[in-house]
Image (cartoon, rainbow, N blue to C red):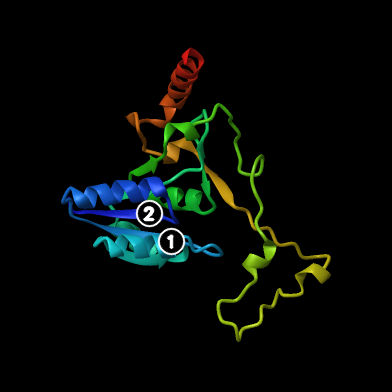
Amino acid sequence: DGDAILTFGRSSAVEMILRNAKEEGKKFSVFVVDSNPLFEGRPFAHRLATQGIDCTYVLLSAISNIIREVTKVFIGAAAVLTNGSVYSRIGTASVCLIAHSFHKPVLCCCETYKFTDKAWFNSLTSNEEGDPNQLIMADDEDCVSDLKDWKSNDSLSIVNMQYDLTPPEYISMLISEVGMIPPTSVPVIIREYHLKVGDS
């Protein structure tokens, strides 16, 4: 009770945990931190508020103004690597870095089917690129982006990376259907899961 939880973007696992906590009568508030160009936090904040959860919506650029009020950080994951690194929506690593700097615990909510025996040490090794034009679209239709003719300029490139990699030292704990485990236990979970799959 009384926690001020920071989330980033949108995560079904995080939403389920927050919804269940609300149904159990826990009292807490949520800072939904968001970023462009996808703004996944907008519908997420709307759903939480509709369920009666006290929410504050802010952009990633303002996180330094609210991080002192936060007691815990909840993030989702697209994958958790065997070395404990978390592969998630672009911007997650920045959120975790700031949280780590302010000694705020970071809890990654992720089902074990997302655990993988792959490992890499940067987000460029394996990533997805979105439409570059998403980064130059103006929210205001009356505004014309200075970069609208970027394709005709050979000296200019626009890269819309979709994911980043958070090092395990920025993750306090992983929350999954097997309970709370440290990032260092990921190889054990992967090994046990493979054994079960092999036996079935």
How many numbered marks have been drawn onto this rendered protein structure?
Answer: 2
Q: Position of residue 173 (x, y in %)?
A: 36, 36
Residue drawn at the location 44% of the way across and 37% of the way down: 169
The answer to which of 94 and 109 lies nearer the viewer is 109
Q: Is residue 17 visible?
A: yes
Q: Is residue 60 above or below residue 142?
A: above
Residue 7 circle label: 2
The answer to which of 139 and 70 lies nearer the viewer is 139
Residue 134 circle label: none
Return the disc, 1 or 2, that comes first in the chain's sequence. Answer: 2
Q: Position of residue 45 (x, y in %)?
A: 36, 63
Residue position for label 1: 41
Residue drawn at the location 43% of the way across and 65% of the way down: 42
Q: Is residue 100 visible?
A: no
Residue drawn at the location 43% of the way across and 23% of the way down: 189
Q: Is residue 193 above or below residue 111?
A: above
Q: Position of residue 41 (x, y in %)?
A: 43, 61
Q: Position of residue 34 (x, y in %)?
A: 45, 62
What amino acid type is highlighted by mark number 1? Gly
Q: Is residue 196 above or below residue 39?
A: above
- Horizontal side of 151 relative to 199 (left or right) equals right
- Horizontal side of 146 relative to 50 (left or right) equals right
- Horizontal side of 57 relative to 53 (left or right) equals right
In the image, farthest residue toward the bottom: 142
Question: Could you give the CA–CA distance between mark 1 and mark 2, rounded to whole angstroms?
Answer: 9 Å
Residue drawn at the location 64% of the way across and 48% of the way down: 128
What amino acid type is highlighted by mark number 2? Thr
